[in-house]
Amino acid sequence: MDYTGYCVKCKKKNVKMENPKLVPMKGKGKVKRHAISGTCPSCGTKMFRIVSAADAADFGK
Ligand SMILES: [Zn+2]
């Protein structure tokens, strides 16, 4: 599965992340959140995208 995000440096939407990694996020209360972290293939800027629990479970498939 490909993950896309917004690159603040290129100001481009739907940039395909390079080396996407699943990152657990500490939320307040009982809410557990996950995000995908990767880098922009054009400029190397770190990109970040919050995903649903279902998407997190599907990560790497
Ligand atoms: Zn970029």
Image (tube, rainbow, N blue to C red):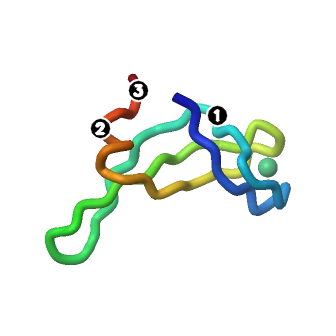
Q: Nearer the viewer, mark 3 or mark 1?
A: 3
Amino acid type shown at disc 1: Glu
> Is label 3 in a helix, a strand or a loop?
loop
Residue 49: x percent and y percent?
A: 53, 55
Please give the label number shown on residue 60.
3
> Is label 1 in a helix, a strand or a loop?
strand
Please give the label number shown on residue 18.
1
Q: How crowded is mark 3: few (under 14 residues within 10 Å), some or many (20 or more)?
A: few
According to the picture, the residue beneath numbered tag 2 turns out to be 57
The span from disc 3 to disc 1 (Cα, nearest Å) is: 13 Å
Amino acid type shown at disc 3: Gly
Quadrant containing the C terminus in the rendered view: top left
* Pointer 2 with pointer 1, Cβ within 8 A: no
Q: Tell me the quarter of the picture where residue 16 sits.
A: top right
The span from disc 2 to disc 1 (Cα, nearest Å) is: 19 Å
Residue 46: x percent and y percent?
A: 64, 51
Residue at figure coordinates x 83%, y 60% from the top left? 11
In the picture, measured across the screen, residue 17 lies left or right of residue 10, that is left
Residue at figure coordinates x 73%, y 44% from the top left? 15
